[in-house]
Amino acid sequence: MADTKISALTAATAAAAANELAINEAGTSKKISITQLVTLLQTLGMPIVTQLAIRYTNATTTGTEVTELSFNSLAVGTYVCRWYLLYRAAATTSSIKFGVNVTGTVDQFVANVYFPSAGVNAATGTMHNANNATTGQVWAYANTITESTTAPNLGPWVAVTNAAATHLLIVEAVVDLTGTGDIELWCASEVAFEISLEVGSSVICTRTN
């Protein structure tokens, strides 16, 4: 059958991951899906982006995995991940803590978390969500070179300026995976008050080699 010009083909109703594209592999005509193409591009540096579709909550000091913001079965390589987290606490005297865990074998691992502090000249451990001082404010941070799960080791801190109001925290990690594995975000409350990560909390993870 003769080839048909692309311009003469029927338009797809909508683009979908299962749609197929024509390729030439070593002189042989074949096809790949958009899913396969995306997977290839991610190995070449295209970011993997995802966000919370379901609100995450925890009212205990024991960490649980934020599965929607974790990555499974990553190939060997170096990954740079940054989580943009919309955080709320049920009480002003409550705070939050995080852990980043890797299930595969790792050559290098380091993680940071930081947020706007209520302190003007020094970090206080209280998260602020409405700073606009003309003199500027400071950021607070914690970092680690140790993975953690049920006992998160980034934080906790001591308070938030406004209960039940959204605060922004940023968690970032660089992971050099030497074996296939998962990169996971874990989270817990400082005390037995509910904390939450709100819908729209997002993560960008990029393989750099």
Image (cartoon, helix red, strand yellow):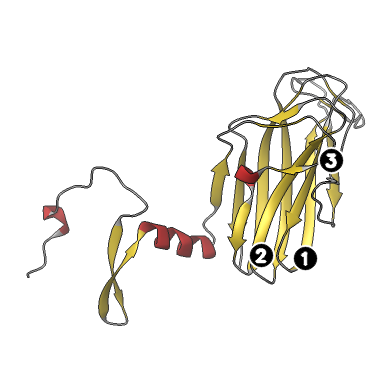
Q: Quadrant of residue 14?
A: top left
Amino acid beneath label 2: Thr
* Residue furthest left as drawn: 1
Numbered circle sitting on residue 108 = 1
Disc 2: which residue: 78
Q: Quick one: label 3 or label 1, which is nearer the N terminus?
A: 1
Amino acid type for the residue under numbered disc 3: Tyr
Q: Amino acid at mark 1?
A: Gln
Point out residue 137 in the picture as x, y percentages from the top left corner: 83, 27
Where in the figure is residue 146, as x and y percent of width and height? Answer: 85, 57
- Up the image or down, 152 lies above or below 88; here it is below
Q: Counting other residues with Cα less than 10 Å from the Cα at mark 1, is it few (<14), some (14-19), or many (20 or more)?
A: few
Q: Secondary structure at mark 1?
A: strand
**Tag 3 residue:** 141
Q: Which residue is found at the position 81% from the left and 46% from the top?
A: 150
- Mark 3 residue element: strand
Residue 207 in view of the camera: no
Q: CA distance from mark 2 to mark 1?
A: 9 Å
> How would you rate the neighbour count of disc 2 (Cα within 10 Å): few for under 14, some for 14-19, many for 20 or more?
some
Q: Is residue 115 visible?
A: yes
Give me the C-alpha separation between circle 3 and circle 1. Answer: 20 Å
Q: Earlier in the sequence, mark 3 or mark 2?
A: 2
Q: Are marks 2 and 1 in contact (CB under 8 Å)?
A: yes
Q: Earlier in the sequence, mark 2 or mark 1?
A: 2
Write the residue at 83% across / 40% down.
Answer: 62
As drawn, 8 above or below 170: below
- Mark 2: which secondary structure? strand
